[in-house]
Amino acid sequence: MEGSTGMHRPVAAAFGRATDWLTQAPRRGRQLAVVRMGIAGTWLLSLLSEWPNRQSTYGLQGPWTWDMAHEATQGSRLLSLLTLTPAPGWSLCVYLLSMAASVQLLLGWHTRLACVFFLLGVLSLQNYAYPLDYSGDILIRLTALYLMATRCGRVWSLDARQTRKAHRGAGAAGVAVWALLGALLAVCTLGPSPGRPWQLGTLWLVWAAQGWSWRACRVPGSVQARWLEAAGNAVHNAAVTVMMGQIVLVYFMSGTAKLGGATWRDGTAVYYALHELGMPFPALTEMICSSQALVALATWGTLILQIGFPLALLYSRTKNWALAATFCEHLGIAALMGLPYFSLAVLSADAIWLPAAWSRRSPPPSTKDNGHHLPHAYTRPPHDETPHVHGLLVTPRSPTPHSSAKPHEDHTVSRQTSPP
């Protein structure tokens, strides 16, 4: 029995550390803020550039008619607000709604609700004109989905600024935005193209969770608020992990797929890519293509970078060099191949891998509520009134006979400490 207990201790300790990492605090706050602003800014810029052609792409004046889009979205079970009605002004309203959601997410005003608005606008426009879909749109859509599960508005946002001054719950504006979003989701649910069940279900879940969190935070220090804080941290950190893994897979799978092409293996793929996709700067393109060595260096360098990207992330120095190389790569794609929004979307998603040391000095956001400090999920109560739950509500323990620590030195966190 003693040997079995000794074998289980490392497993229990590892499980405890993993639970602590998930529930103690939201991770990579500044990196997520960069991702949030980058994705929102990229989508906003693309909508502004498409403004003169919006009627031919998303309206009633293009070759892709409303009837064709309506039939396609229903057949593929795609969610889109544009297929609710063929009214002349409806496409403009949805377009402006998507732009407003981009601005709201960029500024970080009621960020969690802004993420839902943003994803709804992205899905409405991209699913309506899905024959024009490309990899940059897919990355924006996936990143917007992950951002809904994160607390990406705790740094560099209007929410963070308001919280530092004086947080007073949802406020009238927050309740109005929450109600408007609920009305839009209800229209989507009852409309002819509600999409796949998991899509609307996810949007409704985030909407309901936001209202629940506002209600729970009205009672600072309650058990419900503590558990909700811990659950939110766990979902946030899980989404961050998925986002980081997605970038690794995107580069590695892209690099291994290129190995199957003969032009990538013989070092001439960049030459054909630059000539097939257009030349925004013809003189610069011809200068690069005139040198066989430069073309081969760019081709094989891209293969090495994308395939070796997962290995480069194992060490801090190589990771920083790899991130710098990806920045140069996508800068070249934007300038030489005329794909600026694709490059901006990829670079925004890459920002989740920015160095951790860059954000270590960021002050933790305050969570004051009506003059009181909302205890973190890890804040221990001063009395032994709650049961012991590892990693969440831990009561103070008395020191062991072999320990010289004071009774509450390692297990008690001040109730006046704001959560990170």
Image (cartoon, rainbow, N blue to C red):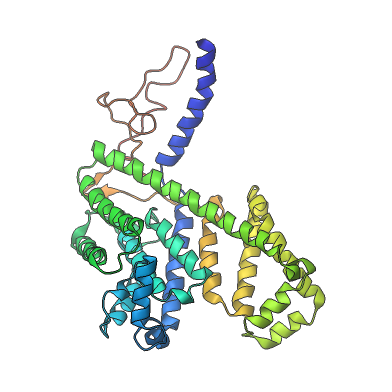
**Residue furthest left as drawn:** 172
Q: Quadrant of residue 153?
A: bottom left
Q: Position of residue 140 (x, y in %)?
A: 46, 66
- The residue closer to the viewer here, 330 or 319, is 330
Answer with left or right where residue 88 lies relative to residue 351. Answer: left
Residue at screen point 46% across, 72% down:
42
Q: Position of residue 187 (x, y in %)?
A: 23, 67
Q: Position of residue 40 (x, y in %)?
A: 42, 68
- The residue closer to the viewer here, 38 or 202, is 202
- The residue closer to the viewer here, 154 or 79, is 79
> Relative to residue 318, is residue 102 depicted above or below?
below
Q: Quadrant of residue 94?
A: bottom left
Is residue 102 in sight in this rendering? no
> Relative to residue 328, is residue 411 depicted above or below?
above
Is residue 122 in sight in this rendering? yes
Q: Quadrant of residue 144?
A: bottom left
- The residue closer to the viewer here, 119 or 198, is 198
Answer with left or right where residue 250 lies relative to residue 20. Answer: right
Count of numbered tags: 0
Q: Position of residue 80 (x, y in %)?
A: 33, 70
> Relative to residue 342, is residue 360 depicted above or below?
above
Residue at screen point 64% across, 69% down:
328
Answer with left or right where residue 360 lies relative to residue 317. Answer: left
